[in-house]
Amino acid sequence: MRRERTRLAGRAVPGPGRPRRPLHGAHPVARRVLALAPRFASLASPITINGAAGALFGSREDPIAVTAFTVTGGRISAIDLISDPDKLHTLTLPARRRQAGQTD
């Protein structure tokens, strides 16, 4: 069985005055993610965005960025990053799920 190749796209909404063109292709997107990930990995927590996998960077009260993943054929085909403060503060983030034994 031959696996269909998907072209990975990375799109970012960094905010006013900081436009960024989308990256296309697995290698350019991977290079960017690997370059930035070490600085932000400790701030990440998993969330569901529009029914799909995503990551929240920062806290729900003060988010730094939100990343959404589009999965096609079992592989990530797109990564969308929003770090524009004006857009982040208008997002409706899903309620945090309580884990067994967790108290507030």
Image (tube, rainbow, N blue to C red):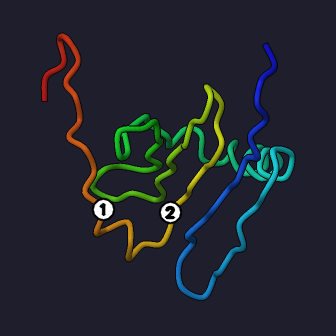
Locate residue 32, reporting x and y percent: 78, 53
Q: Secondary structure at mark 1?
A: loop
The residue positioned 43% from the left and 50% from the top of the image is 58
Relative to 31, residue 81 above or below = below
- Mark 2–mark 1 CB contact (< 8 Å): yes
* Residue 82: image tag: 2
In the image: residue 73, left or right of residue 56: right
Q: Residues within 10 Å of mark 2 (few under 14, many from 20)?
A: some
- Return the residue nearer the eye: 58 or 70: 70
Relative to 23, residue 35 above or below = above
The residue positioned 76% from the left and 61% from the top of the image is 23
Q: Which residue is mark 1?
A: 91
Relative to 12, residue 43 above or below = above
Residue that protrudes farthest toward the right in the picture? 27
Locate residue 42, reporting x and y percent: 55, 38
In the image: residue 13, left or right of residue 26: left
Q: Residues within 10 Å of mark 1 (few under 14, many from 20)?
A: few
Q: Amino acid at mark 2?
A: Ile
The residue positioned 25% from the left and 44% from the top of the image is 94
| Quarter of the image where one finds residue 13 | bottom right
Locate residue 104, reporting x and y percent: 13, 30
Q: Secondary structure at mark 2?
A: strand
